[in-house]
Image: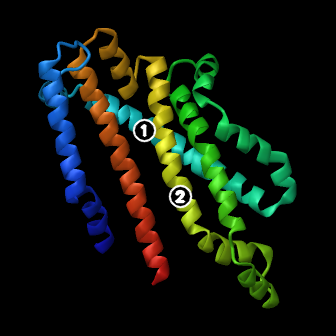
Amino acid sequence: MSGLLRQAGQWLNPPFLISLAMLAIVWEFAGRSADILTLPPLSAVLAAFVRLWSSGVLTAPLLDSTIALLTGLAISLFVGSAVGIAIGLSRVADVALGPFIKAGLSAPMIAFVPVFMMIFGIGSETRIATVIAFSIFVVATNAATAVRSTDPALLEMARSFGAGRWRILGEIRLPAGAPYFLAGLRLGVARGIKGLINGEVLIAIMGMGGLVKKYGTVFSMDQLYAVILLIVLYAAIWVGAVTLLGRLVLTERRK
């Protein structure tokens, strides 16, 4: 509970609230005083958000996007962690797979979305593949770092007591590397959401990204910004929840 209160306190501290209020005031003033089609007042955006939410226009795309995100993240976490652990433990796996992981981290994954569309079509499979492409490499990288970060003294002590490789992995390496695994989860979620929205914008017919494309095409700017606001809140909630989960897990480990 104390971890939850500290996490909430980070969002409710006076400097953040003041900067948020200043942003809202500047946005409202600029939207009303400047005759710019692409910058509606914040009040109009919030009204559009309430209207879209109450009418149910946002709920179905939100659920659709969440299912694709969770599916892609589950695959990324399972496969990425397995590959990362193998790379961290085996020199052969590092030499064979490490360059692909590094290339995946640096490559602009958005360029692969058209390829996924040609392979999987314009359904959910393309969005899931995009989430995986954006998130799996950072998960694998952090998993490899996690198993490599174990204190050598602990490993030597475990070996001296006759512990085998798999027991050392399960009882020493994985618990000791928990902070890195959790960091990979947090970064994977953030990158996965980014990939999801990018893929949906390109597909343009489903999910929250599809709404961005829809309202942007017809220059319905208040509704466009309302959807963007939803996406920002969606990402912040996911990342905040994963961060809080990580802190709770680490707090329990210290006990």
Q: Position of residue 217 (x, y in %)?
A: 34, 10
Mark 1 surroundings: few (<14), some (14-19) or many (≥20) residues within 10 A: some
Q: What is the secondary structure assignment of the residue under circle 1?
A: helix
Mark 2 surroundings: few (<14), some (14-19) or many (≥20) residues within 10 A: some
Q: How is the image coloured?
A: rainbow
Q: Is residue 97 above or below residue 28?
A: below
Q: Which mark lies nearer to you, 2 or 1?
A: 2
Q: Position of residue 157 (x, y in %)?
A: 76, 88
Q: Amino acid at mark 2?
A: Ala
Residue 70 seen by the camera = yes
The residue drawn where x is 25% and y is 63% is 9
Q: Nearer the viewer, residue 186 or 206?
A: 186
Q: What's the mark number on residue 183?
A: 2
Answer with mark 2 or mark 1, whichever residue precedes in sequence: 1
Q: Amino acid at mark 1?
A: Ile
Quickly name the residue at label 1.
67
Q: What is the secondary structure assignment of the residue under circle 2?
A: helix
- Farthest residue in the top direction? 218
Left or right, 185 with respect to 224, comes to right
Locate the N terminus and report the quarter of the image it occupies: bottom left
Q: Position of residue 177 (x, y in %)?
A: 61, 68
